[in-house]
Image (cartoon, grey):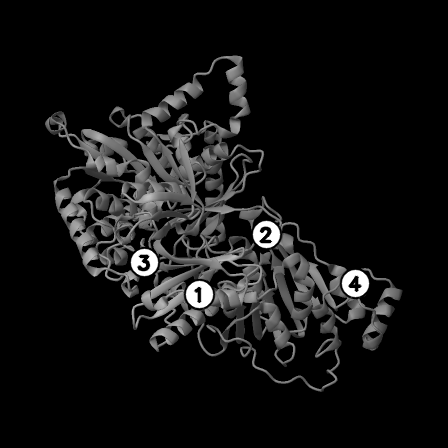
């Protein structure tokens, strides 16, 4: 029989080695899989014992499939009556294409038809299809002119093997998937360490094989390490398999292999080893402890404080040791301490021969160990790019570092200069006295200048904030170019007291050594909470781009939002902050922005002042509705809040409710703003005050094929907004594109004029960055007046007036959007009713109700 085991990219070599270790023959490593040959028993062994495979398949047939008819005939020729168990449900998935078979859904349906027709012909009964939970799952693979069809022996993916109790305990936290954990442990030879026979000297010294998890990050590595130590077959507890609907399945043989696995686990009870776990992040360690306890593995794992001396004390005498870590989810604010711990362990004599493996990003572990890894594998845990790096031993890493730093010839010096970009991060180079009696080691001596500047800024900002009644403000904004970050301080209100820091690193230029930039950032993260008196667990690091494009706000990580995410955020007790006498919920964990833009503090107050003379208020691209709260506080009778995100609309409603603004007069609409504006122009709905704060760029799937670019699309947007203004009304338009240039002449041709009020809306704590946002008052004038105000000649104005009077004679223009031009033709386009008469009455929330 021909089998193959699929795996994530990067696992292939380790998976092939594992299959060979299981005694399987003719093992070949291919991209995303490893193939092997054998009898039924070999396929079962791979299912039962592989820790690295995602699924195990048996190949049922290979054939030509140039077109749909040949595919049908080839699948029909397979003796399905001897493969599919009577009564079993099926599902077929297709992947790949041929020159004529370009649609995988069609290919799968064609293969399904052939299979069912064959069964109907030979057995008198067609197989039932169950796409969600089939008894037999078949995979059709197409490439060039050929195809193969395989049966999934696994059923559910093999990595779905965490104990149910542990899965519930780790819900919502980062827990490394078991197959990724197994790959890390394979790099340090943990299986061989567990199988090692202890000598008499080992027993006398109480020396044991030891695994140190220096960043236990939710417990995934620990659970897999215990499973390997106890020789527990990863598939032993699985209740359902994909081969159960396969006719050749041999239940007796499978039970024999399960009995063998139970015997191996019983024999492994004599094994002895130590597993020491630590994490700089208290939340991650708490999750790991909970996971280990719920899995029933508490007696195997020793948790200790995140200090090197404590770790070594708990490790005791070692008879072979290994060091592992998963730093992919370690908060940047704690990364400095995490790397310091690893660096200290590197120098421990008892761990000199210990191999090291770590899941990491940005080469942080390499800089902590002062040596490039012997192996580096690109992997995608949690669908985010990372690297699995491995070193043969800590003393090898130290030797490499010593050799690299002992160069004293001119040639060696020149080589070192040429490879400056690859230089590992230095040891802590200085110690700072921050005046609190606790010396702070830093990686860069110049970080003392940053500490002094931050201390000075903090003192001045504190006085200013007290005078102005501001509790959340920017303390530092790349005041020193080498320390390019923004630091915002948030003070909680009495309901949720506390202090939080958000430290956003600006992307360093390509000319800056990434290792040096990383070292500076780690020093910032170590220094800032000490000077600003903020607990380390309340420090949140973000990465920002100083770019001409990019979204205004977005989610951290690769996960997609949805109803589950909305419910999770709704359940949580988010911190509350005060601004302008109002209270707002902030979220430091899930998004790049926390729920309120501090640079718009003055702009929001401006909304409140203008709202005192308004009756109806509209907030477009509303985000979390802070401007709506200010408008309601200013006394408007009715508010409409529009955003494309249900999550942000929920948040906006929560902010309104928090401030006592509830009732049917406050409406929340989920819709694409441009589409919604077009709908509202066909109604009589008009607003006295409109606030418009669009993102710089968006390519949300909810917008269909269209994208949003504020520079490209602002004319269309503001022309449409102007048509929603009541008589005498105006809009406030803000955007965050640093290089934004309003197309005033194009806008004037639609009767829109802008008044630049940017300078008066930049708060003092953002004064260093006068381009942090742009802000304008938007008014609608007769087109002749608008064009005259921006400098059009009398001839140009007359030509435009004639175009409006005779639309059929209008010359086609490519410089203004179709929607902006259409806005001049009513309703309310040129001050005249549309040819069809009065606009149709339409409720403004009818376009797309929230939640749909």
Label 4 vs label 3, nearer the camera = 3
Q: Which residue, given by chain and number where applicable, does mark 2 sit on?
A: 762
Q: Residues within 10 Å of mark 1 (few under 14, many from 20)?
A: many
Q: Is residue 51 visible in the rendered structure shown here? A: yes
Q: Residue 789, which numbered label?
A: 4
Q: Pointer 1: what residue?
A: 75
Question: Which residue position holds label 3?
Answer: 153
**Badge 2, how many Cα within 10 Å: few under 14, some, many 20+?**
many
Q: Earlier in the sequence, mark 3 or mark 1?
A: 1
Is 521 situated above or below 584? above
Alpha-carbon neighbours of circle 4 within 10 Å: few (<14), some, or many (≥20)?
Answer: some
Furthest residue toward bottom: 837
- In this view, the mark in front (2 or 3): 3
Q: CA distance from mark 2 to mark 3?
A: 63 Å
Q: Earlier in the sequence, mark 1 or mark 2?
A: 1
Mark 4 and mark 1 lie on one chain; the one further toward the N terminus is 1
């Amino acid at each position: 029989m021909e089998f193959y085991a699929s795996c994530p990219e990067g696992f292939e070599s380790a998976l092939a080695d594992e299959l060979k270790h299981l005694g399987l023959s003719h093992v070949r490593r291919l991209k995303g899989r490893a193939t092997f040959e054998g009898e039924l028993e070999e396929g079962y062994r791979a299912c039962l014992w592989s820790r690295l495979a995602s699924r195990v398949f048996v190949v049922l047939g290979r054939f030509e499939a140039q077109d749909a008819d040949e595919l049908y005939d080839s699948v029909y020729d397979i003796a399905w009556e001897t493969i599919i168990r009577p009564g079993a449900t099926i599902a077929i998935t297709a992947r790949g294409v041929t020159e004529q078979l370009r649609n995988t859904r069609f290919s799968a349906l064609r293969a399904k038809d052939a299979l069912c027709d064959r069964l109907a012909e030979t057995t008198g009964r067609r197989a039932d299809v169950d796409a969600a939970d089939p008894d037999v799952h078949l995979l059709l693979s197409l490439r060039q002119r050929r195809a193969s069809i395989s049966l999934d022996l696994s059923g559910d993916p093999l990595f779905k093997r965490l104990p149910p109790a542990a899965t519930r305990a780790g819900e919502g936290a980062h827990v490394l998937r078991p197959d990724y954990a197994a790959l890390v442990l394979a790099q340090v030879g943990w299986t061989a360490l567990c199988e090692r026979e202890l000598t008499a000297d080992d027993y006398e010294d109480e020396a044991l094989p030891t695994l140190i998890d220096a960043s236990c990050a939710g417990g995934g590595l620990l659970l897999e390490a215990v499973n390997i130590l106890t020789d527990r077959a990863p598939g032993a507890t699985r209740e359902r398999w994909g081969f159960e609907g396969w006719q050749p399945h041999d239940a007796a043989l499978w039970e024999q292999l399960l009995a063998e696995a139970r015997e191996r686990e019983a024999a492994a009870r004599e094994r002895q080893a130590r597993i020491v776990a630590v994490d700089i992040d208290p939340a991650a360690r708490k999750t790991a402890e909970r996971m280990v306890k719920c899995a029933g593995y508490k007696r195997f794992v020793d948790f200790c404080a995140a200090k090197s001396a404590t770790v070594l004390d708990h490790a005791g005498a070692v008879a072979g040791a290994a060091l592992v870590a998963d730093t992919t989810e370690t908060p940047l604010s704690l990364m400095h301490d995490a790397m310091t711990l690893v660096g200290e362990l590197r120098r421990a004599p008892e761990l000199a021969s210990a191999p090291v493996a770590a899941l990491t990003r940005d080469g942080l572990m390499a800089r902590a160990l002062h040596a490039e890894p012997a192996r580096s594998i690109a992997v995608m845990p949690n669908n985010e790019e990372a690297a699995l790096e491995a070193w043969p031993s800590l003393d090898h890493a130290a030797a490499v570092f010593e050799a690299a730093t002992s160069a004293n010839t001119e040639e060696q010096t020149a080589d070192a200069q040429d490879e400056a970009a690859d230089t590992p991060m230095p040891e802590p180079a200085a110690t700072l006295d921050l005046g609190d009696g606790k010396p702070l080691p830093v990686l860069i001596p110049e970080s003392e200048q940053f500490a002094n500047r931050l201390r000075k800024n903090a003192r001045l900002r504190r006085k200013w904030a007290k005078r102005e009644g501001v509790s959340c403000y920017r303390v530092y904004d790349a005041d020193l170019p080498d320390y390019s970050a923004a630091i915002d301080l948030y003070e909680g209100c009495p309901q949720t007291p506390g202090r939080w820091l958000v430290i956003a690193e600006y992307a360093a230029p390509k000319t800056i050594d990434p290792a040096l930039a990383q070292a500076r950032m780690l020093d910032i993260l170590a220094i800032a909470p000490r000077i600003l008196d903020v607990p380390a667990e309340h420090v949140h690091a973000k990465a920002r781009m100083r770019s001409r494009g990019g979204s205004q706000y977005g989610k951290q990580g690769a996960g997609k939002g949805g109803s589950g995410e909305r419910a999770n955020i709704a359940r949580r007790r988010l911190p509350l902050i005060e601004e302008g006498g109002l209270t707002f919920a902030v979220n430091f964990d899930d998004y790049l922005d926390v729920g309120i833009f501090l640079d718009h503090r003055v702009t929001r107050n401006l909304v409140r002042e203008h709202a005192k003379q308004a009756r109806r208020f509209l907030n477009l691209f509303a985000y979390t509705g802070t401007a709506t709260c200010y408008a309601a506080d200013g006394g408007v009778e009715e508010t409409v809040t529009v955003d494309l995100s249900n999550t942000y609309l929920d948040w906006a409603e929560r902010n309104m409710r928090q401030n006592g603004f509830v009732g049917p007069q406050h409406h929340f609409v989920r819709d694409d703003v441009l589409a919604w504006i077009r709908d509202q122009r066909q109604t009589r709905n008009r607003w006295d005050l409109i606030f418009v704060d669009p993102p710089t760029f968006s390519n949300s799937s909810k917008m269909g094929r269209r994208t949003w670019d504020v520079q490209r699309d602002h004319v269309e947007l503001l022309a449409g907004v102007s048509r929603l203004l009541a008589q005498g009304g105006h809009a406030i338009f803000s955007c965050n594109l640093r290089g934004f240039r309003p197309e005033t002449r194009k806008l004037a041709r639609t009767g829109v004029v802008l008044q630049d009020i940017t300078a008066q809306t930049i708060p003092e704590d953002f004064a260093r960055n006068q381009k942090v946002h742009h802000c304008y008052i938007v008014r609608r004038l007769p087109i002749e007046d608008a064009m005259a105000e921006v400098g059009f000649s009398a001839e140009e104005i007359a030509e435009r007036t004639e175009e409006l009077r005779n639309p059929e004679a209008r010359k086609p223009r490519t410089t203004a959007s179709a929607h902006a031009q259409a806005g001049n033709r009513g309703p309310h386009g040129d001050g005249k009713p549309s040819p069809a008469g009065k606009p149709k009455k339409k409720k403004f929330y009818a376009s797309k109700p929230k939640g749909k």
